[in-house]
Amino acid sequence: VDLETESKGVFGLSFDELLGSEWVKDDSICFKVCIEEAVMKEHPSGGQIRVGKTDVVYEHKPPSVEVPPSTLQADLLSLLIEGRHSDVSIEAVYGEAAPVTFSAHTGILSQRSDVFAAAFSHEMRESATRTLTVTDVPPPALKALLHFLYTDDFDEVLKVLREEATHAAGTDAGDAASSSAGSSSAAPISCAPEDAQQSIAQLQAVLAAAHKYGVLRLLRWAEGQLCDKLSCEMACSLLSLAHVYGATELERNCLAFMKANMPNVVKRAEFATLPPEALVKFNMHCAGIEPSEEEPGRKRKRDDE
């Protein structure tokens, strides 16, 4: 330490001045240190400890920042509806109806369905045309499937089915009105669709589409919806559907319903057309023997005989 430097020393004095001051006696100097005790109210979570009087008191309040709701679902759905940045076309060619084309995205479909992923990876004449043609799924069911793959929302599936049913009912009514316009003796036209049967047919198609593309969550949802729509008219056809697509819960509900309503069910023509295996399961259920469950979601192989 350079004791001769004026900036050094105690009390602003140089070394020589300090030796001659009243603070030094017999070559010694004494200091008086005053310590004030302060009580800490709470242990700090940070690395600093501040004590003493506080000039400003800060009251913590929850932040008033409003976080906007998520738009991910709507954003993904808009990609499908508007066809922005699409890299593949899904063409529904079913029966005599006009083909319907959806502009989709291979990345999303491949992530959501292993069947789509395999189709885009291996089958593609589609790789050249970037078009996947679907011939065994009705356009409304395929549209509902795609909307679910983009949103994972069952309400969106129901919305699509309602819109498609309304559109189909309006089209049928318009065609009927046109065909009867020239006949003065034609009976009045009823525009009211058979909502229950149409709803069941739609759900059956959605279940089949979900099975085809390996979308188990949608398949199980459609299965649950159909369990709530059992009737003597539909029990046999739903049992056949459950048998083909491995819908075990629907199958159990159908068997229980048919047993409870046996007099009305067995006299229907649909009962005579049940697959042999389904008929055996019905007889076993009536005898109190539960058929062994098969793997859910797995389609059964039909006998060639």
Image (cartoon, helix red, strand yellow):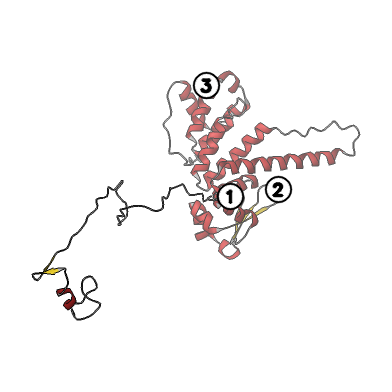
Q: Position of residue 289 (x, y in %)?
A: 42, 24
Q: Is residue 136 left or right of residue 178?
A: left
Kindly indicate the quadrant of the structure image that contains residue 105: bottom right
Q: Position of residue 220 (x, y in %)?
A: 50, 38
Please determine whether, in this image, residue 287 is positioned above or below residue 119: above
What residue do we see at 51% from left, 24% from top?
Answer: 256
Q: Secondary structure at mark 1?
A: helix
Q: Is residue 262 left or right of residue 194?
A: left
Residue 146's label in the rendered image is 1
- Whether residue 305 is visible, yes or no, is no
Q: Is residue 115 left or right of residue 157?
A: left
Residue 58's label in the rendered image is none
Q: Nearer the viewer, mark 1 or mark 2?
A: 1
Q: Marks 1 and 2, Cα distance to the nearest angstrom?
A: 19 Å
Q: Which sits earlier in the primary sequence, circle 3 or circle 2?
A: 2
Residue 97's label in the rendered image is 2
Q: Marks 3 and 1, Cα distance to the nearest angstrom?
A: 37 Å
Quadrant containing the N terminus is bottom left
Asked whether disc 3 touches disc 2, contact meaning CB atoms under 8 Å apart, the reply is no
- Neighbor class of circle 1 (other Cα within 10 Å; few <14, some 14-19, many 20+) is many
Q: Give the residue pinned by disc 3.
A: 259
Number of numbered markers: 3
Q: Position of residue 32 (x, y in %)?
A: 18, 60
Q: Nearer the viewer, residue 119 or 44?
A: 44
Q: Position of residue 157 (x, y in %)?
A: 59, 43
